[in-house]
Amino acid sequence: MKLLRNLLLLVTGLLLLIAVAAPGVIGPQVETVWQEQLGRIEGLERSEYRRGWFGAETQMQIATGDGPAVLRSEIQHGPLLFTSGGPRLGAVYSVTTLETEQLPQPLRAQLRAFYGRLAHSPVRLETVVGVDNNIDNTLRLQPFARSDAGGELEFAGAELVLQTDYSGAVLSGAVRLGEIRRREGDHEKFYSQAADGQLTIVPGRSLEGGLQWPLVKAETESGPVELRRVRLDLALNLTGGGVKLESIFTAPQVQSATPVSAVSQRILVPEVAPAVLAHYVSQLLPPTGGRNWAEVFGPPLSLQQQLLVESANGPAMVDADIDWRGYRTGAGGGAQISEQWPMPMPGQAAGAAQWLAPMTGIIQVTAAEQALLQSPLIGQTLLLRQYGLLEKKDGELQMLLEVKRGDLKVNGQRLPADLFLMALTGQF
């Protein structure tokens, strides 16, 4: 028994010695690798690395479109790591957050609109390098609840978990997007259940992933709408001049006051600059104030889309191939903005030619006759048929729109854009 006790004491002492000594050996290696990784970050303006025995701290200043942002990382040296999920063995554990006081003012204003005071970083990246050199990355977006004159918006947060080996050649993992709820008074205007999905990233080449929502509900002008088993698949591939984007949206079960039973949409952007893509994605967020449409539709964009709406009365399809040149306030390739801004949106007759001026493309509408006549679009359908703009062919209603820099043709016949929108909205 005495021998066993002495052996246990010896083993315990060796383990403590390793736990104390190992960080001093691991630390310099971590710093070398960390500095190598920093050198690969595009837009890195400066960095500081302060190493101790059991850990290190680093700050990175990275250029953004709105100005420099500062990231702070706290690093633990193994082999014993104290992570947010509890103790574990590994080589490195790091937590990277935003320095909220040193954010560019536009980005800080956007985050404060959702998170308020920004007492803590709304984004948190945790990285663990295991003893087998496999790397676990967990990116968390914190939940928030905000209230304004437009109502209440609640978001339960999001989490992205990616695993890779030491080479970092492929990152794969899971995505979870928390519940989103929007209320106006006592009325729930929008609700989405938590979504789950998968994601695969090949650094420098591609990103592919998908999300599925069990339930999405919304209040519309036609009444409440429920979508079940909603799925969004996304593929991004780097091209020579930018990014190729393809998305597929499907909602196979639709319940509403209309006969619509299912909806699917495919969007293809053959090539777009990353900054332009980021701009249009940012427009999907609820605005903190009124929108400046000149800025929203400023950058050029080319896209193709196919929309299929299925109903008990037959399908309706919209195919579009659009080249949007963009709006610019100065000299350049985009159309000029006149003093009539804010620019009229589609559906407003005045200034329709200005709206179409930057556009070239084709839009083909095909639908079963009853699919339109037994829908909320019955009024527009009857008007367009009366004016000869919606033709009946092979038992279907069809309309072909061709636009070339403000010049509009409907079913092959030239028509002033203002008159077309007047016919569409019943303003004749």
Image: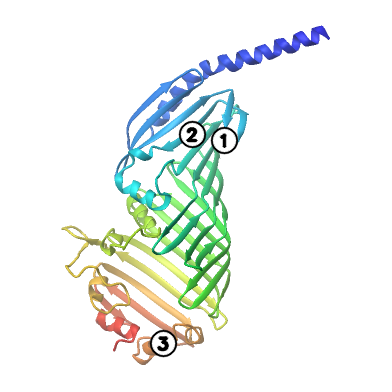
Colouring mode (rainbow / by chain / secondary structure / one colour): rainbow
Circle number at residue 95 = 2
Percent from the top left, x then y, of residue 165? 55, 34
* Residue 191, x across and y down, in percent: 53, 63
Residue at the disc numbered 3: 379
Single out the mark in the foreground, 3 or 1.
Answer: 1
Q: Nearer the viewer, residue 164 or 414?
A: 164
Disc 2 vs disc 1: Cβ atoms closer than 8 Å? Answer: yes
Q: Going 37% across and 63% down the picture, which residue do you hit?
A: 303
- Please tell me which of labels 2 and 3 falls first in the chain: 2
The residue to which callout 1 is attached is: 84
Q: CA distance from mark 2 to mark 3?
A: 57 Å
Q: Earlier in the sequence, mark 2 or mark 1?
A: 1
Circle nearer the N terminus (3, 1): 1
Q: Hey, what amino acid is under mark 2? A: Val
Residue flagged by tag 1: what amino acid is it?
Answer: Ser
The x, y position of residue 132, in whole percent, is: 60, 28
